[in-house]
Amino acid sequence: MLATCIEVLVALFGVMIFKKAGLQFRLLIFLLLYGAATDIFGWTFYKLNRTYVLIAVDIYTLAEALLMVFIIQSIGLFNNLKNIFKLIYLLLFVCYVGAYFVMPLISDDGAYRGPYSFGYLSTVAVLAAWASLKWIEGAGNKLNSPVFALLAGVFIYTFCSVFIDSFIGTTTGDAVWWIHDAANITAYLIFAYCFYLIKKSTTVEKSVINLPEKV
């Protein structure tokens, strides 16, 4: 609950700088709001209708997977890998259909959620780490870069959550879920710093902010 409360506050802070933010930051703000709404919906209706809550979470999972990849791509560091990203989107969607529509016909224990989460979180973590390394190669103070803060937040969120989310639907997952919350809170605070950097900027940011200089 604490993690979601912080997520809401950070998302509202993001709304305040929405007009100054570039595309990737606006998508991040939307994702934070969507995630918080999904969590609140889950708390409210879990005891009344668990099926509807799981459907809402499952839909959010696909949205998060696709949007996080797109956020990283929209930064502009992988313009020469457009076909690779198209393949990633396709695999994320196809695997989602297999995990959430085909697997339930074979087994209804909910364990299929874990492998998909593990897969997309691993993918995003690798992309975020790779993008961060490419960003560091550029000139400038990285601590004052909203893009670097965004990438760092995404990496921490996905890397720390990847192993925890692989246990979704199991008793082990329930026992170690606090680690997931701690990682989320850390990521949200980094996103808040990212929005702060945009807020104190004197110009309206474009879709790509502070791109590293070409060497």
Image: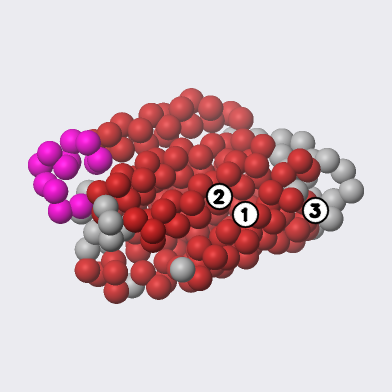
Q: Is residue 122 above or below residue 174?
A: above
- Residue drawn at x 37%, y 36% is 92
Mark 2 or 1, nearer chain start: 1
Q: Residue furthest right?
A: 202
Q: Residue furthest left?
A: 106
Q: Is residue 73 above or below residue 156?
A: above
Camera-side residue: 131 or 200?
Answer: 200
- Residue 148 seen by the camera: no
- Residue flagged by tag 2: what amino acid is it? Leu
Mark 3 or 2, nearer chain start: 2
Q: In this rendering, which labeled residue sits more in front, label 1 or label 3?
A: 1
- Residue flagged by tag 1: what amino acid is it? Ala
Question: Label 2 to label 1, Cα distance in Å?
Answer: 6 Å
**Is there CB contact under 8 Å for labels 2 and 1?**
yes
Q: Which residue is mark 3?
A: 199
- Residue drawn at x 51%, y 47% is 34
- Residue drawn at x 46%, y 68% is 1
Q: Which residue is mark 1?
A: 11
Q: Position of residue 51 (x, y in %)?
A: 25, 49
Q: Quadrant of the C terminus?
A: top right
Q: Secondary structure at mark 1?
A: helix
Q: Quadrant of residue 153?
A: bottom right
Camera-side residue: 137 or 154?
Answer: 154
Which stretch appears magenta? 99-110
Q: Position of residue 134 (x, y in %)?
A: 63, 47
